[in-house]
Amino acid sequence: MSKQIKDFRGTPLRESDFQEGKVLYVHDALRGEYAWDTGIAIGHYLAGLKKGVILGARCDHCRKIVVPPRTVCEWCFRPLTEYVPLQDTGTVNTFSICYVTWDVKRIEKPEIPAVIEIDGASPGHGILHKLGDVNPEEVTIGMRVQAVWKPAEEREGAITDILYWRPLKEVKKR
Amino acid sequence: MGMRKVAVVGAGMTKFVRRAQETGKELSWEAVRMALDSCEMTIDDIEAVCMGTAPDAFDGLHMKAEYLSDGAGAWLKPYMRSYVGGGTGIFAPIQGWYHVASGLFDTCLVVCEEKMSSFYPHAQAAFLTIFDHTTERALKPNLLWIFALEMNRYMHTYGVRKEDIALVSVLHKRNAADHPCALLGEPDITVEDVLNSEVLAWPVQRYDVSPVSDGAVAIVLAAEHVARRITDKPVWIEGVGWCLDTAYWTNRDLCYPRYVEVAARMAYEMAGITEPRKQIDIAEPYDPFDYKALHHLEGLQLADRGQAVQLYIDGTAARTGNMPVCPSGGLLGVGNPIAAAGLMKIAELFWQLRGEAGARQVPGNPRRGVAQAWGDLMQVGTVVVMGR
Ligand SMILES: [Zn+2]
């Protein structure tokens, strides 16, 4: 009973208690190494990236094209067997301007992660990637962007075969 | 459905601290002992134990729940651990509820423990492995990214302003100043303080975020016939719900948590709630970030989409308002030891609905509350409705 309890337990420590040896502790670094096979659908996706193509997967039943591709449609639970090439252009669905590393150290040049809706996929279907070649203050949701690929001979079949996405200068058709 | 009524009859918790000297086992025991003492029960009265705790990676200890079991009072008892990411602290009591509602047990102890400080140099790294190892981790993502991406999408879709979202952090941290276990209660914090805090991953700033912590919470559940012998103030679990959305998080609109809506509708239907905005007196939505409280209030159907911030602007969410939100101080103020933080919300409703919340007490004899948690890759919603 909260108001009747006066003595809540729990003893706070500071980082300095460790550094100054005020508490005993053990330190260990756990090593884990993994080799992940890509699976079937992502295997196709990565092979596509190596060729400079972003692949989606089509569900004829739901009339949806999803990216990244997968072997089952979560909407109808039917198999997805058809891979379709998408455009390497898209629209920024959302973005962030990140000034820290994962362990909250400041970084000088901010990173701009974004969810990019890929042209040719169903509306709202995007991937996580990064923006570049752009002033962070000029990035907006809805901005049109284009993939900047690694040179073909350097691609290895990885999401990093796309270096980043930069603002798209649309060629106006007459 | 032929299920029995289940009540919360006791609750206990440790302080939430940045780093506790006690081990997870010791923290669990302190919370359990307090919960049992609060309802004058002993461990012999407990028929089963449910444990909620985060991935083993936090502690670098495989089979962590088994390690914690002695402290949690599970020796030689039916024992089960659940883990649904940040949603765990509300899922563990749901699991305890169905242990009792099913008729299998008359009493069940629910314990949630988290010790995030062991991980060096920062528990954030333990979260990095939630991203897809092939399509996302190669980009070297930072956990803050997904929250910043979601917050920006939310703000953009509904035109919600950062200076209004900051009101959430201000209210919760001020509320926490009245919580004896709080890590970050700040009675005098202002919107300016939040807006001037360090930018981590825009739009997320330092004071938009809850602090990682160590801590444990325990509650005692009992079937109706037992509960009425134990206490004249049982707080009933009236409805439960949970739901998981797709792991392809870049394929859904981050502006609205439909998985919370599904979970809430399940819980409301069970509780006979048809008009949640009128029938819920206190809300404890999950608030690891300030915008998340708004997101979740909307998923819980307690505000229209994009409108939850109005509850803070017009005072509805204040402790003295028509529907207080996070009178505990929430994760933003009390602290965020993942699983323990969720169960803290259940303990808060228990104390509030019994009129025992002390300086935090919501006036007007509140009758019913809802607690909710969220987690995984922004995809799980867990909801419990409690009433007296
Ligand atoms: Zn389908």
Image (cartoon, coloured by chain):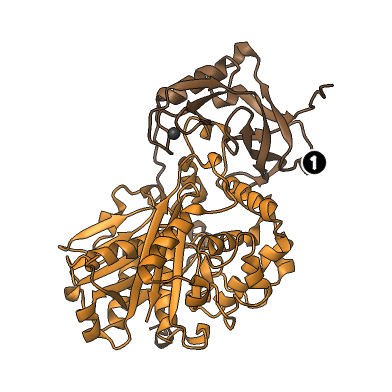
Q: Residues within 10 Å of mark 1 (few under 14, many from 20)?
A: few
Image vertical order of residue A52 relative to residue B267, above or below: above
Colour in which chain B is drawn: orange
Q: Secondary structure at mark 1?
A: helix
Please name the residue that numbered disc 1 is placed on.
A138
**Closest to the observer: A41 or B261?**
B261
The quadrant where residue B196 appears: bottom right
Colour in which chain A is drawn: brown
Residue B211 location, x and y as percent? 54, 61
Q: Is residue A9 visible?
A: no
Residue B141 location, x and y as percent? 57, 39
The residue sitting at 64% across, 49% down in the picture is B153
The residue sitting at 55% across, 77% down in the picture is B323
Residue ranking furthest to the right: A174
Q: What is the chain identity of the residue bearing mark 1? A: A
Image vertical order of residue A1 relative to residue B101, above or below: below
Residue A127 location, x and y as percent? 57, 34
Say which quadrant the N terminus of chain B sits in. bottom left
